[in-house]
Amino acid sequence: MSLWTSSEIEAATLGEASIPFEANGLSIDTRTIKPGDLFVALKGEHRDGHDFVKAALDAGAAAALVSQAPKGVKGPLLTVGHTQRGLEDMARAARVRSNAKILGVTGSAGKTTTKEMLRLCCDALGKTHASAASYNNHWGVPLSLAGLPRDAAFGIFEIGMNHFGEIQNLVSLVRPHVALITTIAPAHLEFFGSCEAIADAKSEIFEGLIPGGAALIPNDSPYAERLAARAAQAHVGRLVRFGAEGEARLLGWAPDAPGLDKSEAMRIKADILGQAVDCVIGAPGLHIAQNAVAALAAVALMDGDVLNAAAALKNFTALKGRGARFDAGDIHVIDERYNANPASMVAALALLGAKRGRRIAVLGDMLEMGEGGIAHHAGLAKPIENARVDLVFASGPQMKALWDALPATRRGGYAENSAALAPLLLAALQPGDTVLIKGSFGSRMAVIVDALKARVA
């Protein structure tokens, strides 16, 4: 059964196909396109997908969605007025034809981790489709939704933002049965100014809920009541809270439960809407436990089997750049390089604090923090102390504030950028060290990860 026929796409987009075709998937990237995919030629700030139509067709694409036929290109094309709008039209049509239970997830941290937990949980219960990677923006959400299989039982969609109105627009496509906010934290403060404003922007996800849909909010958040008020304004049918208190409660977690490797797994106990849960999760940390409780509550709200979903979490592993671990020779590495804000920094440092041996934190700037950025960076000194970090290596102009706030005994090295910091770190390493690497994507902390891997290559 094909994902799309050309006649269905014509009806959804008011476009015109050069010849009939069927597509089994969608792609916007010729580097990862699969034979039978529909290539969507999006136009961005730096690249125009129309320049890659020939390469897509040569790679086996079933057809290309275009706004004009590229010169000299022969092959099946479906021409629409605007390819971004065409993709959104397909997303709307996919949502209308689907009988799947749909969940939308957003938050300042933990979105992708929770989405991947939900993928595992729901896949144990029926055919599940979820956003790839962090496809949570203006093209990622419609691309993911347009790829929703006809026979899916569950659809899990991550929704991100860095300005007001973005979630509102995207959730109008997704129209979830359940809307989950993982947490509210100082992220994108440059664009919002306050965490209250961030909470308001995240709560736009409630506005797209189908009638009778449910909202899941973090009860431990200082902004829980604000989120609840926004849910009431959106006439949400049911509000469920998760955390230490609420309808979905984390009762306990044990990183060193008998028979488990505490560095790679933990056991949690929870009450999920009245259902007792005792399960193993294949990654450690309080924030992981909290995300798991949220995911299981979402399963319950979608009328899924919570116990079977919980059993699937033993197969969860921390994601690349979001807590994945590897050994670089005799050094253990926690790779948290993908993104950073104060809340996720504190969670990552707590993970480091649970390790034995020397604990080394390698930290890059948290970006888009606005006027309070310097204070937020300097404020990491206390969680570093709480985690008993032995040495800190820092890079970036804002991390200089943390460096200045650290006692001399914890200063490992400082540099203006990650490339200059790498040799300072490598020179200080000792066998048995655990190294945490974390920073915003723009801080280029992947340079440190690559340097550690090259150390033993």
Image (cartoon, grey):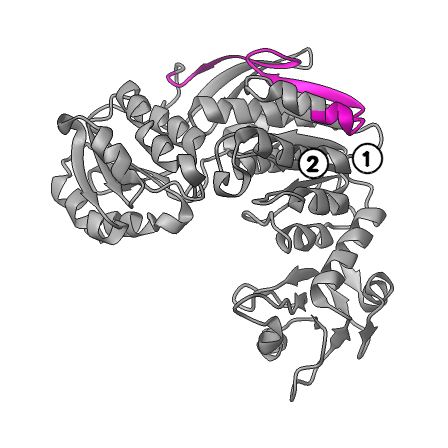
In this picture, residue 40 sits left or right of residue 373: right
Position in image of residue 171 (x %, y %): 72, 42
Q: How crowded is mark 2: few (under 14 residues within 10 Å), some or many (20 or more)?
A: many
Question: 227 and 242: which one is in front?
Answer: 227
In this picture, residue 137 sits left or right of residue 439: right
Position in image of residue 388 (x %, y %): 25, 21
Q: Which residue is drawn at 13% across and 39% down?
A: 428
Element under disc 1 = loop
Task: Residue under label 2, please give it.
Answer: 205
The label shown at residue 334 is none
Which region is colored magenta?
230-256
Q: Residue furthest bottom?
A: 72
**Amino acid type at image mark 2:** Ile
Q: Residues within 10 Å of mark 1 (few under 14, many from 20)?
A: some
Asked if 22 appears above or below 351 in the picture, the reply is below
Position in image of residue 101 (x %, y %): 76, 36
* Residue 237 covered by magenta stretch: yes
Asked if 138 appears above or below 291 in the picture, the reply is below
Q: Which of marks 1 and 2 is nearer the N terminus?
A: 2
